[in-house]
Each structure stands twice: as C-alpha cells, then as structure tokens.
Amino acid sequence: MRHEAAYRAWCERATADTDLGAELASIARRPQEIEDRFYRELSFGTGGLRGVIGAGPNRMNVYTVGKATQGLCDYLKQRYPAPSVAIAYDSRNKSLLFAQTAAGVFAANGIRVHLYGRLMPTPALSFAVRRLGCSGGVVITASHNPARYNGYKVYGEDGCQITTEAAGAILARIGAVHVFDGVSSLPFEQGLASGRIRHIGEEVERAYLDAVCGQSLLGADIGRDFAIVYTPLNGAGISCVPECLRRNGFTRIVIPEAQAEPDGDFPTCPFPNPEIREALAVGLACAAEHRSDLLLATDPDCDRVGVAVRDGDGYALLNGNQIGVLLLDFICKMRTRNRTMPGRPVAVKTIVTTPMAERVAARYGVELIDVLTGFKFIGEQIGLLEKRGEADRYIFGFEESYGYLSGAFVRDKDAVNASLLICEMFAYYRHEEKKSLVQALDNLYTEYGAYGERLESYTFEGAQGFRAMERAMRSLREAPPAQIGGVPVTRISDYQARVTASADGTRQPIDLPQSDVLKLALQDGSSAVIRPSGTEPKLKVYCFAQGKSPSDSEALLDELARYFGAWIKGFA
C-alpha cells in the first residue's frame, strides 16, 4: 500500500528530530494511525499550514516545514531579484525549532532572513515585513488551537496573509519538492555566523509598539486607575501587551503567575482559546482575588483577545461580536468627539460577523465592507485603500473570532492594539458615563435591536472525518432545506458558485472570491453561514438572529442550533 511505503521511507530517513523516530516506531502495528499520518499532505492554503505536531506528511514537523519553505523559496526567487523574509514564532512546542528550520532553508536558497530573537505577536511580523521591506514573512503558530498543534502562516510583501492566487502558486511549487531530497538547508548557527540570518533588532520592536500606542483615543483627563487582570495564556502576548498598557497609563496590571511564562503545553488551559470560558478560569480566579473589574486574555500568538467584566457578583464574558460592536461604536464616538473622523470613513467585517455592525456604521456615516472569512481579506481592503492614497479612511476592522484592528500600521488582527482600545473603552464608560461594558452593550441593543449570534462547531478528525465534511457540504448544496423550525428559507448564497438564489427565482452574483461557504437566510431575518474551518478539522455553523429582546434572539438561535445539530448527525 502507498501509505505503508511512505511510512517505511520516513522510518529510514526522518532522523533530524528524534521525537519523530520514536513516534514512527510506536505505530508500527497500527495501520489506522499510519493511514492518518500518510493519507495526504497537510493542506497548504491562504493560512499556510496547520496541523498536529508529529511524524508524516499530514503532520507538522521539520520535514513538512522544510518542504513548504523550499516551495516558498522557489516562488519568491521567481518573483524577486533579491528576496528577503521576516520570521516570527510563538510559545508553542517546537515553534523555535520550526522557525530555525525555515530560516536555514531560506538562507541556503540565498534569501535574506530577519528573525525575531524572542517571542513576538503575529501582528509584529506583519509590521516587520513592511518595516524591513521584505518580500514575505512566516509566523510559526497554530493560534488558539490545542497544544498538540502547530502551524506555518505565510505573509506577502504587503504584510497580509497570502492571497488565494499566491497560495495556489506556492502550493504548486511545494508539490514539486521531494520532502527528503528536494530541500536545501543550512544549519541555523552557520546562517547566523555568515550573516544570512539576522535577528530583528529592538528598533523594529519599539517602532511596532509606537505604532500601536499611536492608536490611542483617550484624553489625559480620563481616569485609568483601576485593576486589570491580563493573561497571555502562556503565550507571546507577554512580550508587548503589559508594556503597551503601562505606556498609556494603565499601570495596575496583574498577571496570573501560572500563565505568565511561555509554555507550549499550556498546563492550566488545554485549549488556549480566549473565546471559551474554560481558558479564562485562571484569569477569572485572579480577577476575583484582586477584585478587578476587567480581565483580558490573549491567545498564544497574541492576535486575538477575550474580555470578561465584572457583572454583579460574577463576571460576564463578552463574545467577539459584542466586543467588535462595542469597539466600532466607541471608535466612531471618540473620533467624532476628538474631531479625527476622516472623510468617508471605512470599516470592514467578515461575512460571519454580526449584522448589527451595519446599523452602528450607518449611524455614524461609516461605509461598511463585507469580506470573506479571514482577517487577510480585511488587510487586503486596507491595502487597496492605501494604493489609492486613502489609508486614513480606514478606522476599524473586526471578525467574530475575537480579531480587531484600528489602524493601517499592520495588515492582520492585533491583540496588542485591541487590548489598549478595550482598556480605553472601559475607562471611558467608567469615568464619563458611569457604566460597565455590559450596560453599554445593553444600551446599544436598545438603540439598534437585540442581535444574537452563536457559533456551532462540529469536529471531524482524521481521513474519514475529512471525507464526511466534504459529504456534508455537498449534501447541503444539492438539497438545501426549504424551511428551518417552520420558518421559510428565502435566500441561499453559495460562495463557491458565487451566486445568491432567492425563493422567488431571482439570482444575484456574489462579488467576492470563490469560497466553500453557504449562507441560508430565513424569512424572520435570522440566518446561518456554514463553512469548513480552514485551520481546524471542524465544520462551523454561524447562527444569527434579531429579536425584540435578548431572550427572543436566544430562542431563535436555539432553533437554528437544533436543526443543524440534527442535520450533522447524518454525517458524523
């Protein structure tokens, strides 16, 4: 069998990391485990690579990293006479090893390497690419995935994650590389000694923090004397978030000791995802101990931030849509108040982010642009504005998965920037309006309607799971429901076919790139967006509703969740 032959080849030749040899030996008599590692290569897309750390082409290891880097080298050398790259890495297991492996491959291929000498947030990589005039960049991270994952995220010269077209061209190059015989590599220390690999200096780090601090909206007269609990969840946020907050007057910062230091095992939070309450357990306990009214938590590569605020005797977690709407309103309010609102302001959100943003943007005369899922598409819009000399029109971009950015200084979501804005927003409402963020959100619901959102995720592990996800999406396309919970489906938007079909027979083109996404719109104004995750083995269903009250919205969301929960059982 092909899997067995590939397995034997790896047993003989994968000697650069002793962990791989031990793993391969342990599965010698387990054919299903062999198939899972060898039935395909890790998918390389606009998010680069992401997968479980381990042996085989369907895992993250020094060989899959080396092969991807060689393909990227071939792509860059074809397009640039003297290419260069910037590299960053987070706190995950083997992140430093993978970063040094990639650096050695770039160096051996004559590509200059600028590598951060310490953990830095993902947005700092986007900044470095542009600051240093690089042809591209790489971040070694698996964002908020569990500890057994790592990844390889690729950026273009504009500081954005690569486009679909670029990913396709790079993938073709990677496909031509033999994993063992086709990769040129230089030992990392030799690359450093020769000058082909250089560490990114403090000047770039300072410039990045200066740019973040330049997004401050709060006047000096607003009080900042309140306790903030901040947890980096054992990740890269420790490098920048505390310093940024202190530079802007937020000095009462408490960091839980158990989550302060980088640790790829994430021992106190198996899922280092600030979207889920379990990940915030240590931070919430610390907040209660110190009677803090605000908790911030950033994921391991510090591009997402979660928020909890004191609400009565406990703490309320605000989801990504709620934080995004609050920030959009706050930014518009402060820019109007400070007389810094640009002419024809622009905000950007993804198609799976709350439609409530449309109401807020309209209130302030802000043009709101919808893009496909992934912050790279928000970054792309900033780049388009910049090409027209209109970058100052951009005021905010956000996505429901806890990603935010208020300035054009980077092209990716930025939890350092967002942490500063959230603290300023908290201080404003506390000092000026005597409100909590929960009360500020309730006021927005009163003004714009009680919007509700919910994400349902269904996991499909391994080769069989991957095929089951494909069957599920195909089934929904071929036989979509006519109604959900007795409410008629009035429009079906297929982003793969790039067309919206209405119940009355009309069809409208979708002016966005092709993507494996379906959206069902119901007669009562609720909707659902269904898509396979690009970074995890999951099928995601984003549910949206608007009721007369939050309880009305929750009831509508429950109905959508019940329908899709029953539907997915046919493919589990």
Image: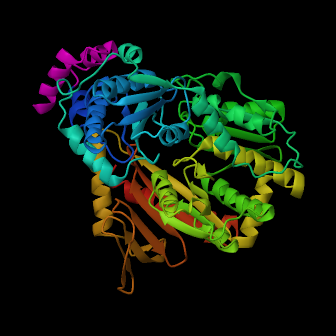
Residue with the most extreme front position? 81
Magenta part of the chain: 1-30
Q: Looking at the rendering, which quadrant does residue 389 occupy?
A: bottom right
Across and down, in percent, residue 217 comes to 76, 52
In magenta segment, residue 5:
yes
Residue with the most extreme left position? 1
Say if 448 sits above or below 514 in the image: below
Residue drawn at point x = 34 percent, y = 59 percent:
516
What secondary structure characterizes most of the magenta part? helix
Across and down, in percent, residue 213 comes to 70, 43
Residue drawn at point x = 73 percent, y = 59 percent:
330
Residue 371 visible? The answer is yes
Q: Looking at the rendering, which quadrant does residue 50 occupy?
A: top left
Say if 278 sits above or below 185 in the image: below
Across and down, in percent, residue 452 comes to 62, 63
> In the rendered view, does 200 fall on the left or right side of 213?
left
Q: Looking at the rendering, which quadrant does residue 48 occupy?
A: top left
